[in-house]
Image (tube, rainbow, N blue to C red):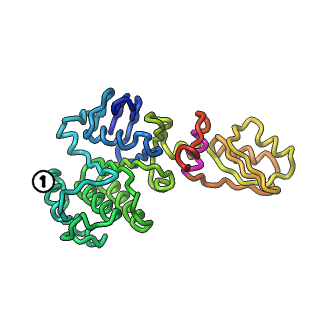
Amino acid sequence: MIEIHNLTKHFDKIKAVDDVSVMIKEKTVFGLIGTNGAGKSTVLRMVSGVLKPDEGTVAVDNMPIYDNVEAKKKLFFIADEPYFFANANAQTMEHYYSGVYDNFDKVEFYKYLEKFNLDKRRRINTFSKGMKKQLALLLGICAHTKYILCDETFDGLDPVMRQGVKSIFAKEMEERGLTPVIASHNLRELEDICDHVGLLHKGGVLLSKDLEDMKCNIQKVQCVFSSLEDELKVLNGLTVLKKEQRGSLCTITVRCTREEVEARFATVDMIFYEVLPLSLEEIFISETEVVGYDIKKLILG
């Protein structure tokens, strides 16, 4: 488990991270969401031990991370712009990381290079941005650390490569309990992979919740009522977050469980109703509006 308590970081007079506290459980995918400048990269650099916090603590499996070699062996950090040695190729980087990480899997690494069509002898400075991201991810995965920290992981990857990386994460989680922590400014990138999501805004944590819990407590219903009286009867007492009407078709987002929704609609004679799955974007819009923010402006632009 990664435990972050009251983390604060200044750069001159700018407070980049402001009293952040988050718990990252093992064997889950933690998504760290926030606009550019929200503090995501700074948080990841402190979690990986690259930066020392001005205030607060970071512990990895109950070990402080900063200046702690044993704790750092449990982490692999992939920056937004991965660093490679000058004139290095993939083979050079493998030699380096296999010397740093005891469990680095060389055989697996070269197999992945072939699958991703990355030439092990080609200089990395001739790679495209997407190819550099792929190489950094493969190095991180093959290091076989317990945690992998990814800053804007999917930025620069085409849709096919994104799905390929997500599949590798799923495989590694199942086989050896990998815990990916993924920072992104784009909710849609993390739609189908995250278990828990934290939202950063202006250096602080606006929201940190389990995605499944959020899905269970917010329902989206598309329906056609027989009469206005039936609609009022069903909605009376429910917390309606959003309501749209197109002709006779009504789309309602309510805060309650699926069982409560079904029980309510069973009390009247409905022409039609269906409980629809919610997207991560819709869930976050609903959750952040409750605390007085418009995520459409924060994340979606």
Residue, x 45% and y 33% (percent of image)? 204
Camera-nearest residue between 236 and 283:
283
Residue 216 in which image quadrant: top right
Residue 20 in which image quadrant: top left
Residue, x 41% and y 30% (percent of image)? 18
Magenta portion: prevailing SS class: helix
In the picture, the quarter occupied by the N terminus is top left
Magenta highlight range: 280-288
Q: How far across and down, in percent of the image, does residue 125 sit?
A: 24, 64
Camera-nearest residue between 9 and 116:
9
Q: How far across and down, in percent of the image, does residue 2 sit?
A: 33, 38
Asked whether residue 61 is in view, the answer is no
Q: Is residue 126 left or right of residue 33?
A: left
Q: Is residue 30 left or right of residue 55?
A: right
Residue, x 37% and y 61% (percent of image)? 165
Residue receiving disc 1: 99
